Image (spheres, rainbow, N blue to C red):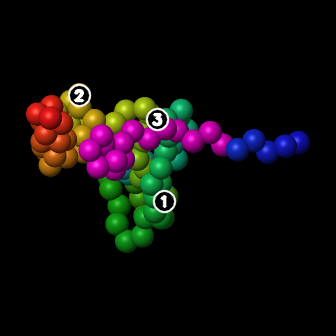
């Protein structure tokens, strides 16, 4: 059987500096079970509770707790909600560049 190369997801980049945009993620902390859903899970952390307990979450000493970050695979943070810039500096640089091109 031939191994197919994994399809890599297209990462959105800033139009000005070509840096990848931040992902819209959700942090989940202090869970008793690891994540078993359909979202992309990265930055998974497994901790064995030693020396403390959290009664409100029913976590006792010796339990294993998980913390992870989830991403849906398509959502990114856009500058002002709709523009593909990583921040105000890149937006300003792009605007100045566009003004200079239109004057010519």
Q: Position of residue 93 (x, y in %)?
A: 16, 46
Picture residue at 30% right of the left edge, 40% below the top? 15
Near-viewer residue (56 or 86): 86
Circle 3: is it few (<14), some (14-19), or many (20+) Cα within 10 Å?
some
Q: Secondary structure at mark 3?
A: strand
Circle 1: is it few (<14), some (14-19), or many (20+) Cα within 10 Å?
some
Q: Which residue is mark 1?
A: 46
Sequence order check, earlier mark of 3 and 2: 3
Q: Which residue is mark 2?
A: 82
Whether tag 3 and tag 2 are in contact, CB under 8 A, the answer is no
Q: Position of residue 59 (x, y in %)?
A: 40, 54
**Nearest to viewer (mark 2 / mark 1):** 2
Q: How many marks?
A: 3
Picture residue at 52% right of the left edge, 47% below the top? 34
Q: Position of residue 80 (x, y in %)?
A: 16, 33
Q: Which residue is mark 3?
A: 73
Determine which of the numbered discs, if any, sits on residue 64 in the image: none
Q: Secondary structure at mark 1?
A: strand
Relative to 37, say whether 65 is above or below.
below
Q: Does residue 93 show up?
A: yes
Q: Position of residue 49 (x, y in %)?
A: 43, 64
Find the magenta span and give its range. 6-22
Q: Is residue 69 magenta?
A: no
Q: Secondary structure at mark 2?
A: loop
């Amino acid at each position: 059987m031939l191994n197919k190369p994994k399809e890599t997801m297209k990462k959105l980049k800033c139009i000005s500096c070509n840096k990848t945009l931040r992902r819209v993620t959700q942090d989940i902390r202090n869970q008793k079970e690891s994540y078993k859903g359909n979202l992309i899970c990265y930055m998974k952390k497994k901790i064995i509770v030693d020396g403390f307990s959290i009664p409100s979450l029913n976590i006792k000493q010796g339990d294993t707790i998980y913390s992870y970050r989830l991403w849906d695979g398509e959502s990114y943070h856009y500058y002002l909600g709709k523009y593909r810039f990583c921040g105000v500096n890149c937006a300003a640089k792009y605007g100045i560049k566009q003004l200079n091109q239109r004057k010519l």
